[in-house]
Image (cartoon, rainbow, N blue to C red):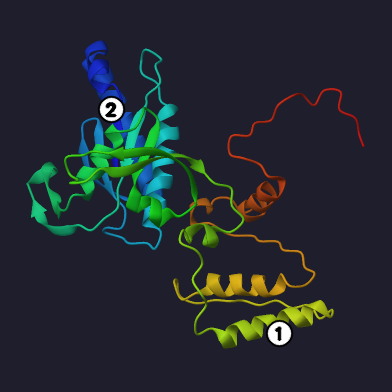
Amino acid sequence: MFVDLVGSTAMSTQLDLEDMREVIRAYQNAVAGEITRFEGHVAKFMGDGVLAYFGWPRAHEDDAERAVRAGLAIIHAISQLRTPAAKTLLTRIGVASGLVVVGDLVGEGAAQEQAVVGDTPNLAAWLQGAGEPGMVVIADETRHLVGDLFLLRALGRQTFKVSKNPTPAFAVISERTLESRFAARQAGGIAPIVGRDQELALLIERWRQAQIGEGQMVLLSGEAGIGKSRVTEALIEAAAAGPHFLLRHQCSPYHGDSALYPVIQQLVHAAGFADDDRKTGSTAGAQQP
């Protein structure tokens, strides 16, 4: 991820040096705070630019999603900051995914950093330049990794020095309100279930017992990536053949501070609320039903 502060050059000519230093410090702290919150790694501060990695030195199965979420959070956090002249700060953010080789430490003292070989950091920097102020722009490979988790707008094919061929770029509009995060990640369709006949048969049998009035509860646990969500989807598909009422509550590692987040999201999806919905009108004059 590459984050750039919009209009910093013009700002530096308008503000006192000490005021400008405070603006840059507040900007860097806000960016670093959001990156850290999503467990990314701030690699380098370059004045009004910030380079960050997701997937190194700590890897997650959803690093692309974490980077995009961090980008949206940074856009919001920076928009809350003000210059001494009461002007709002804006950023542009680029997110790219790809292979890199992390090498030895280079430089000395405060300039010391881990050498990274690969075009991905450069592509992220070029992507942010293709966006408008207050926009997160992602590369095509990142789009495939995040699936349908976010609402995107195609920016067409962009030509960058780091890419031999024009590269498709996409602006991230917002997070989608989804019933199933698992299905949203399967951009190419849900893969067939393999080698889980015994587990699926057990779940279906428990569902049949529940249908005849014998209440059941099943705990499905295991290491990440072994197919728990896929088995759950198979059970839902099997239950869909008969009368049923589905309530899907999903926790999120990004909302650990909200105990009722799964319930809230289920209600939001059931009501068909969108992220940009706002309460309108007044409750004045409302009558009891």
Q: Earlier in the sequence, mark 2 or mark 1?
A: 2
Disc 1 designates what residue? 205
Image height of 179 relative to 123, above or below: below
Which residue is found at the position 37% from the left and 56% from the top? 63
Q: What is the crowding at mark 2: few (fewer than 14 residues within 10 Å), some, or many (at least 20)?
A: some
Circle 2: residue type: Ile
Nearer to me, 161 or 273? 161
In the image, residue 140 lies at what x, y percent? 34, 49
Quarter of the view holding residue 61: bottom left
* Residue lying at the far right of the rendered structure: 289
Disc 2 designates what residue? 24
Nearer to me, 20 or 184? 184
In the image, residue 202 lies at what x, y percent? 65, 85
Circle 1: residue type: Glu
Q: What is the crowding at mark 1: few (fewer than 14 residues within 10 Å), some, or many (at least 20)?
A: few
Label 1: element kind: helix
